[in-house]
Amino acid sequence: MRVIAGALGGRRLRAPRGLATRPTSDRVREALFMALEPLAGLRVVDLFAGSGALGIEALSRGAAFADFVEPAREARRALAGNLADLGLAERARVWPLVLPRGLARLAEPLAAADLVLVDPPYGGGPARETLAALGAPGVLPAGACVVLEHHRRDGAPEASGRLVLERRRAYGETEISTYRVRGEGEDALPRGGAA
């Protein structure tokens, strides 16, 4: 596994031992970040971070700071090693929280987030619960982007609270659903643009 592009492009990443984490493929990461650029100066929150590949990719491409959330000790060890190896420790913070209930402790980082990356275990439950929590009023600022990686079979809602689906792309069995946080009182727009 490696960083795809940006200042750290080509650098190798440690992966946690075992099968508890499922790293995002290089192909999916490349497509995801090409759709999100530019990232310069953004504040990122990487939920279900695993080795940190998604958040580290954002930092490599110019994001200012990333908060990583990962409950598994072995994955956090790999993540901390990656941040140290790549000289990113000053631009990152690691939270040992179980999601989605741990989101309550992330009020400050989420309130400042421009981009939230959500890569939960496949199976639907954690993804839907996390989206519901992120879409609640006052959690994320209007205009923030939430990107959910999920199995095609699991699906993802068109909207969840203040989160409105902007686009969905399939890469084999993996889907990337991108949401935008609408402002308080703002009506949801149909997917694809203006009403």
Image (cartoon, grey):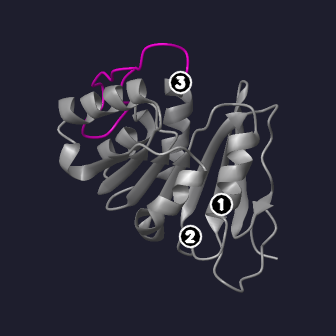
Question: Magenta-highlighted stretch: main secondary structure?
Answer: loop
The residue at 80%/57% (across/down) is 158
Residue 191 left/right relative to 113: right
Give the spatial CA distance, label 2 vs label 3. Answer: 26 Å
Residue 67 left/right relative to 83: right
The residue at 36%/23% (across/down) is 2
The residue at 38%/60% (across/down) is 43
Q: Which mark is residue 133?
A: 1
Q: Which mark is residue 139?
A: 2
Say which amino acid is labelled 3.
Thr
Determine if residue 114 is in view: no
Residue stretch rendered in magenta on the structure: 1-22
- Nearer-N-terminus badge (2/3): 3
> Is 17 part of what is drawn in magenta?
yes
Residue that label 3 marks? 21
Which residue of the protein is positioned furthest toward the top in this rendering? 18
Residue 54 left/right relative to 14: right
